[in-house]
Image: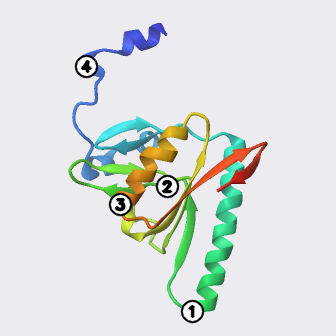
Amino acid sequence: MSEILDWAREENLQPAPITLEIWKKLPEDFRRLVEVVNGEAIRAESPTRPLQKSARRIADFIETAAEAHISRHRSGCLDVDMDFDVLLWELPRMTIRRPDIALFDCAPPELRPLPASMVKLVVEVVSPGTERVDTADKLAEYALAGIPWYWIAWVSNNRVDSI
């Protein structure tokens, strides 16, 4: 605890809100550790292995369904990915979230962060430390960003319990 007390000083506060221009210049290692909420860097912990495994299973299911949809309707291009940056909005202060899984219109890999307007579905796998953020904060943010579907996945005993 003394490390926190030593760290908690005015000079350690984030000096200014993070903009998209600033975000693109931040080191990749730093960007992998945070999400940006209203311009502020927020620590985003990596999920545990059981949660990662559950997320991978859900992503595989969504990807199979997306491929079947494209094949059946012969139109568009959909992609599924895990743990990547989605730009929810830039103003008044930028918010970038990193959903566990997302289904989105195909985009070139260099398009980072991916605009929310391209996202069709977001899935967050709830862990004990993220429950309030996943079930309340992100629910509202994804809705405000215009993402039409948001699934909250609950995991128990190393398996997806419910969505």
Residue 93: x %, y % from top left: 24, 47
Marked residue nearer the N-terminal end (4 or 2): 4
Q: Say how the picture is coloured.
A: rainbow
Sooner in the amino-acid sequence: mark 4 or mark 1: 4
Quote the CA–CA distance across marks 4 and 3. Answer: 33 Å
At numbered mark 3, what does the secondary structure look like: helix, strand or loop?
loop
Task: Report if the CB atoms under discs 4 and 1 are less than 8 Å apart.
Answer: no
Three-letter code for the amino acid on which mark 2 is drawn: Phe
Q: Tell which tag, 1 or 3, sits nearer the viewer.
A: 3
Q: On residue 145, which mark appears? A: 3
Q: Which residue is mark 1?
A: 74
Say whether disc 1 or disc 3 marks the residue closer to the N-terminus.
Answer: 1
**Which mark, residue 28?**
none
Residue in front for this viewpoint, 154 or 89: 154
Mark 2 closeness class: few <14, some 14–19, many ≥20 residues within 10 Å: some
| Residue picked out by circle 4 | 11
Numbered label attached to residue 84: 2
Q: Please name which of the two marks, 4 or 1, marks the residue nearer to the observer.
A: 1
In this rendering, position of residue 136 left or right of residue 53: left
Report the quarter where the C terminus lies.
Answer: bottom right
**Are there few (<14), some (14-19), or many (20+) residues within 10 Å of tag 3?**
some
Could you tell me if the residues under marks 4 and 3 are in contact, i.e. CB atoms within 8 Å? no
Q: Tag 1: Cα neighbours inside 10 Å, few (<14), some, or many (≥20)?
A: few
